Amino acid sequence: MTAADGAAPAGLPSARSGNGVTSSGAPTVRDVAEAAGVTPMTVSRVLRGTSGFSVATRERVLRAVEALGYTPNAVAQGLRTSQTRTVALLIGNVASPFYARMARGFEAAMRAEGYLTMICNTDQSRDEEARYLTELLKRRVDGLAVAPVESQSLLLRSFLARGVPLVLVDREVPGLGVDTVTADGFAGAAEATRHL
């Protein structure tokens, strides 16, 4: 057999092992489809909850999913839907009680909406912030909240140009035109003074 008729080229392992699962060890939609005796499209539609299948077909697919230990590939889904279901929070210091509480609340709110949160600690470094922003552009996060070290407006504008929702936290970037959440330090100081 040759690569043209489905076999792996000489010296390379076959894509499928003897148990019907890819050599990477992670079962694919195709593996589930073969085990259930249906098409990969049917597996995808059953797993998305689409109606129009007999109870027997749905049960066969779900049994195959369980037997093979299949879990959906989030990267593949992201390519198909152009959504990663991932958001990022860039903060200055995760050890700070202020940022720690913010991160906890942000992550809980995003989790409730079905998003995974990446928490990025910039250590108040402009270079670290730029590195994270560049990497997050590559990873195509679906949303971004930033406590900016300073005005990285060119990088932040790149997110806006791609239609990525952006919120600034604790500091404003003049001229960016996005929602900003800040504490009212003057009112806080006045209230603290009243308690003295």
Image (cartoon, rainbow, N blue to C red):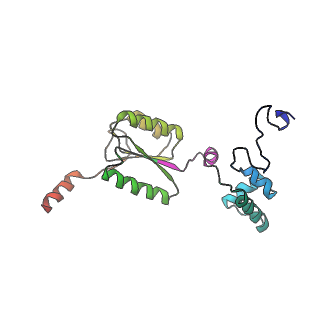
Quadrant in the picture for the C terminus: bottom left
Across and down, in percent, residue 119 comes to 43, 47
In-front residue for pair 161/74: 74
For image coordinates 79% across by 67% down, the residue present is: 56
Could you say which quadrant of the image residue 90 lies in? Answer: top left
> Residue at left 25%, top 53%?
184
Q: Could you say where residue 8 lies in the image, as x and y percent from the top left?
A: 79, 36
Magenta residue span: 74-87
Q: Residue furthest right?
A: 1
Task: Check the image and report above or below for 70 versus 163.
Answer: below
User: Which quarter of the figure has residue 150?
Assistant: top left
Q: Can you say whether 68 is above or below 54 in the image? A: above
In percent of width and height, residue 61 lies at 75, 60
Extreme-left residue of the structure: 196
Foreground: 143 or 61?
61
Q: In this view, does 26 lie to the left or right of 130?
A: right
Magenta span contains residue 82: yes
Q: Answer with left or right where residue 187 lies relative to residue 107.
A: left
The answer to whether any part of residue 157 appears in the image is no
Report x, y in % for residue 28: 71, 49
Q: Is residue 121 visible in the rendered structure shown here? A: yes
Q: Is residue 169 magenta?
A: no
Q: In this view, does 66 lie to the left or right of 130?
A: right
Say which residue appears at 50% left-offset and 58% top-offset.
Answer: 113
Residue at horizontal 73 percent and vertical 46 percent from the top: 22
